[in-house]
Amino acid sequence: MRLAILADIHGNYRALQAVLADIALTGADRIISLGDNIGYGPEPEEVVRALERYRIVSVMGNHELGLASRSYCSRLHATARESLILTRSLLSPDALTWLVALPAVLRCGEARFVHGCPPQSMTTYLHAPSENRLRRVFAAYPERICFAGHTHDLGFHQQDGGSIASCALQAEQKSLDPRTRYLLLPGSVGQPRDLLNWYAKYMLWDQDAATIEVRALAYDVQATIRLLGERGFPASNAQRLFW
């Protein structure tokens, strides 16, 4: 089975279109989103409709949590909070209902899918975690493989017996050792912060071949930037598309 893993689309429908077109060419049996489907980007309604149309299952990200919980939204930094207020105004009632009903975690065989930090946090970041912290994280869930978003970064952490290691990823294919546990970060579709390039990123997991592949796609980023301005989103949202 081949799974396409998407994360942090953030209302960037043009980036999502490029990713979905690539998935149609490369082939995937299932598509899973790690949340933050909305927030920051100018086309949240179009993103939700595409997720529904392609039957993409998703966990809840912290931006969806911000729609579900006004208390949490009030604690976000000003740019995220302002973006969520605009996002809510652009969503239909049906799309909003879909977003706030998303689960905190998904499980599929030997894999777990979360937005932030396993076992099921939507809000906790895994930015440069220490070895001791990674040991605690790996001990918190039973699955051999976990996919997480939230950082908008590409990389992976692994546990091989008593050894812990962390590595960055490029747009590349990597073999997975069946004796090793992995915590995989597939980057961001709509707002990458991997310092590689501004392309939309996602990950293909081939379970039969025991490989992962990072895919990077160009898209009409200027169209997204124009819409951000037209719809009144903070200027920093556009600047971050060239992070």
Image (cartoon, helix red, strand yellow):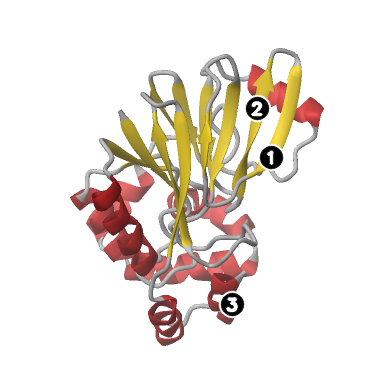
Rounded to the nearest angstrom, the CA distance separating label 2 from label 1 is: 9 Å
Percent coordinates x, y for residue 87 in the rendering: 41, 67
Q: Mark number for residue 234?
A: none
Q: 42 and 12: which one is in front?
A: 12
Looking at the image, tell me whether mark 3 or mark 2 is earlier in sequence order.
Answer: 2
> For this rendering, which residue is in front, 81 or 69?
81
Quarter assignment of residue 77: bottom right
Label located before the other in sequence (2 or 1): 2
Q: CA distance from mark 3 to mark 2?
A: 33 Å
Task: Tell me the residue that label 1 is attached to.
Answer: 167
Residue 173 in the image, given as x and y percentages of width and height: 50, 41
Tag 1: amino acid? Cys
Q: Quadrant of residue 94?
A: bottom left
Q: Amino acid at mark 3?
A: Gln
Disc 2: which residue: 158
User: Is the C-beta separation of discs 2 and 1 under 8 Å?
Assistant: yes
Residue found at x 43% / y 57%: 9
Residue 95: tell me if it is visible.
no
Circle 3: is it few (<14), some (14-19), or many (20+) Cα within 10 Å? few
Which mark identifies residue 239?
A: 3
Query: Is residue 26 toward the left or the right of residue 112 in the image?
Result: left
Label 2 crowding class (10 Å Cα cut-off): few <14, some 14-19, many 20+?
A: many
User: Which residue is rendered at x = 50% and y = 69% of the image?
Assistant: 83
